Structure formats: C-alpha cells, structure tokens
Amino acid sequence: MSPETTPTRLDLKKTEQLTIEWQDGRTCTYSVSLLRSMCPCALCKLQRDQRDPHQLMTEQKKKKTALTVLPGNYAEPIVVKDASLVGNYAMKIEWSDGHDSGIYSFEYLRSICPT
Ligand SMILES: [Zn+2]
C-alpha cells in the first residue's frame, strides 16, 4: 500500500462526517451524505451512471418538491448505523436506510476526497 491510500487515523461521526488522515499527511473529510451518495456497490453505481448530471442539478435545486428516492437525495438524512474495517484495505458502512453492501476501499475514498 502506498502512503496516499494508507489511513493513519479514521474518525467517524455517524450523523455527520468521516475524517481520514492519510500517511502522506493529507486529511480528507467526507460528509455522510456524500459517502452514501457515492456508495461503491454495483447497484448504486448503476443508479449514478443512469443519472444525467444536468438533471441531477435541477433536482437538487427543486429539492423541496422533487423527492426522488435515489442515493444522496432522501427526504430524511441518512446516517451511518455501523461501520467496520475490511481487512486493511477498506471499510464497510451500514446505513440507516438498511443499505449495507458498500465496501469503501481506501483507494476509492482517497479518489473521492472532497477536501
Ligand atoms: Zn450501494
């Protein structure tokens, strides 16, 4: 594993955010809603691929009227119910909506780092 994908500290606040400090000195903070919407499982990936990015923006602007149930666009905020490490390369997150098939590899988390 390279320093960029090796976490030295993982700090999960189940209703707010995940903070990861990496071995190369970078710190990434992910909101739980971002993590849910970026779920790497096959089903969520398919749903993301099928969405038109332009349409996504329109939906977000109309959030109060358009309540399409898709990752990252829920009426109620989704929070983390449970999380566990998978080997030394990934973490598995169980969500309050019952979804638990997403395995977030550290490589993937590093690639979606928003900060
Ligand atoms: Zn998923």
Image (spheres, rainbow, N blue to C red):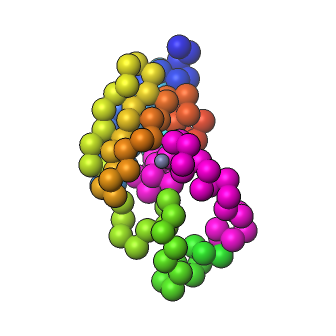
Give residue 78's quadrant in the image.
Answer: bottom left
In the depicted structure, whether residue 28 falls above or below residue 45: above
Q: Main secondary structure of the magenta part?
A: helix
Name the residue located 51 percent from the left edge and 42 percent from the top edge.
41
Residue farthest toward the bottom in the current orientation of the protein: 65
Coordinates of residue 50 in the picture (x, y in percent): 68, 58
Coordinates of residue 29 in the picture (x, y in percent): 45, 44
Coordinates of residue 22 in the picture (x, y in percent): 47, 26
Name the residue located 52 percent from the left edge and 23 percent from the top edge.
5
Residue 24 appears in view: no
Name the residue located 48 percent from the left edge and 83 percent from the top edge.
64
Name the residue located 43 percent from the left edge and 68 percent from the top edge.
74
In the depicted structure, whether residue 65 falls above or below residue 49: below
Foreground residue, 14 or 90?
A: 90
Residue 73 appears in view: yes
Q: Is residue 81 left or right of residue 8?
A: left
Foreground residue, 105 or 30?
A: 105
Give residue 77's quadrant in the image.
Answer: bottom left
Q: Is residue 53 magenta?
A: yes
Q: Is residue 44 magenta?
A: yes
What segment is highlighted magenta in the picture? 30-57
